[in-house]
Image: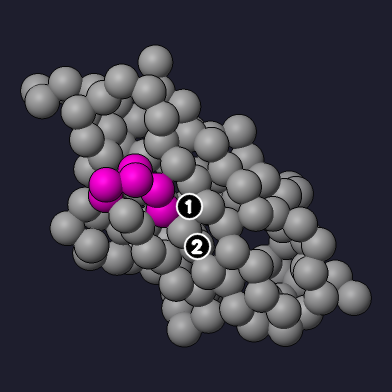
Amino acid sequence: QVELLESGGGLVRPGGSLTLSCTASGNFFKCNVMGWYRQAPGKQRELVAQITSGQMTNYADSVKGRFTISGDNAKNTVWLQMNSLKPDDTAVYYCNADISVRSWENENYWGKGTLVTVSS
């Protein structure tokens, strides 16, 4: 069984910073892609950023230049450094991972989510 353990959410003022982390644990072969999605009240879940095991990254246009995703393959961990936060960034942030549970079999997993609130 694979679990994604998230941490780092909270309340921050506009212009502030937060760092989210997510670690994959359990019995699996490797993490192929890890990333963050978010869902604001009344809105659909959307991709924020993702990183491959080869360290290629992809960002939503709304966070480019403000958020940075990084990862450590040996630790099966990904971080999302969020700077210059805006009230529109308020959402539940979910970790997502595409994992090879065996060398020939991939599965997709979600974390339980961590709330980020940007408010003065």
At 72% across and 83% down in the image, what residue appears? 15
**Residue displayed at 23% across by 62% down:** 55
Q: Which element is circle 2 on?
A: strand
Instruction: Return the x and y of residue 53 as percentages of the image width and height.
Output: 21, 52
Total label count? Answer: 2
Q: Is residue 5 visible?
A: yes
Give the quadrant of the C terminus: bottom right
Q: Which amino acid does label 2 sit on?
A: Leu
Front position in the image: 19 or 65: 19
Q: Which amino acid does label 1 sit on?
A: Trp
Q: Specify few, some or many for label 2: CA neighbours under 10 Å numbering under 14, 14-19, or 20 or more.
A: many
Label 1 vs 2, first from the N-terminus: 1
Residue matched to label 2: 80
Q: How crowded is mark 1: few (under 14 residues within 10 Å), some or many (20 or more)?
A: many
Are the two marked residues, 1 and 2, in contact with CB atoms closer than 8 angstroms? yes
Question: In the image, is residue 44 above or below residue 83?
Answer: above
Q: How is the image coloured?
A: one colour
The location of residue 91, given as percent across then percent down, is: 69, 54
Q: Which residue lies furthest to the front in this view?
A: 74
Question: Left or right: where does residue 40 sit relative to residue 68?
Answer: right
Q: Does the magenta stretch include residue 30?
A: no
Name the element at disc 1. strand
Marker disc for residue 36: 1
Residue 26 location in percent, x, y? Answer: 37, 23
- Distance, label 1 to label 2, CA atoms, is 8 Å
Q: Disc 1 vs disc 2: which is toward the camera?
A: 2
Specify the segment rendered in magenta. 73-78
Q: Where is residue 73 in the image (x, y as percent from the top left)?
A: 26, 49
